[in-house]
Image (cartoon, rainbow, N blue to C red):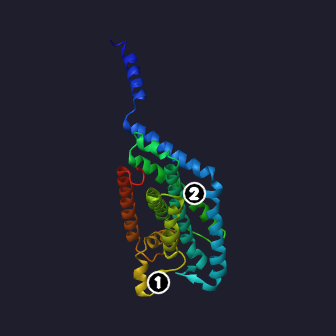
Amino acid sequence: MAANDPLRSRLLDLGDARNPNLLQINLVGLGTIISREIRRVARIWIQTIVPPAITMTLYFIIFGNLIGRRIGEMDGVPYTTFIAPGLIMMAVITNSFGNVVSSFFSGKLHRHLEELLVSPLTFTTIVTGYVVGGVVRGVVVAALVTVVATLFTDLNVVHPFITISVVILTSMVFSLAGLLNAIFANNFDEISVIPTFVLTPLTYLGGVFFSISLLSPTWQIVAKLNPILYMVNAFRYGMLGSSDIPIGTAYALIGVSLVGLYSLVVYLLNRGTGIRT
């Protein structure tokens, strides 16, 4: 009996390999989705990575060098330095959102998303895979725009942990927002509505180019209804050590947004909203 034990163990191992459990399936599936999303970003890098660098360079030239010289300092730092965290965060928000909304909607359009939905993968695995892809693009773009920013101003990161964590958490929030947009979109026009009419105005009014201390008390209250304001200021605090918003409040809002959007997206996928006809 003892002589057959190694053979029996080998057969059991082969059986396990041929019948992987649900956890193994989801781990493989998660890795596959993430790998596909990263390859997609790398394959069309001239569309995903280069444009943000060019756009932010123009912002630094126009607002930083030309207008910034007339403004002087804001919150005790040169204006170019003040807007640098906001411009980096703007790039993170738009690219995280854009990556997921375009990728997920393409899956709906070309019908290969159905293969994911009928597979043994859980909805949380599918959502997490797309979100990680958005985060990767957001972080890469953030690093590139930071390099661009150093060409125009001196940046010394005061709180590295806060800086990195805010970038990652914000990328996650807007990756989920992009996924939510893609779920409800029925054509390419509908995936551009939110970025054009919601995301862009909120970003410009989110303290990227100004401190809300310059606003009247009434408009400060209105400005604080903008969630992007908290993310921009949290990131600015991490990089420069100054913020118009308490850092704890910013983290709380980001956390609530993250949990709320994740739960909503998983719920909608489970119901088949925007997927099943």
Reply above or below: 195 against 74. above
Q: Residue at x 50, y 80 (%)?
A: 211
Q: Position of residue 269 (x, y in %)?
A: 39, 51
- 271 relative position to 36: left or right: left
- 55 relative position to 175: left or right: right
Q: Residues within 10 Å of mark 1 (few under 14, many from 20)?
A: few
Reply above or below: 130 against 13. below
Is disc 2 placed on a helix, strand or loop?
Answer: helix
Is disc 1 placed on a helix, strand or loop?
Answer: helix
**Residue ID for mark 2:** 140
Q: Position of residue 181 (x, y in %)?
A: 46, 60
The amino acid on which the numbered mark 1 sits, given as a three-letter code, is: Ser
Q: Residue at x 38, y 63 (%)?
A: 255
The amino acid on which the numbered mark 2 sits, given as a three-letter code, is: Val
Label at residue 213: 1
Q: Residue at x 52, y 59 (%)?
A: 96
- State the residue in front, 33 or 146: 33
Question: In this orientation, does residue 236 appear?
Answer: no
- State the residue in front, 257 or 190: 190
- State the residue in front, 67 or 146: 67
Q: Position of residue 229 (x, y in %)?
A: 46, 73
Label at residue 228: none
Instruction: Give the position of the N terminus as an image quadrant.
Output: top left
- Precedes in sequence: disc 1 or disc 2: 2
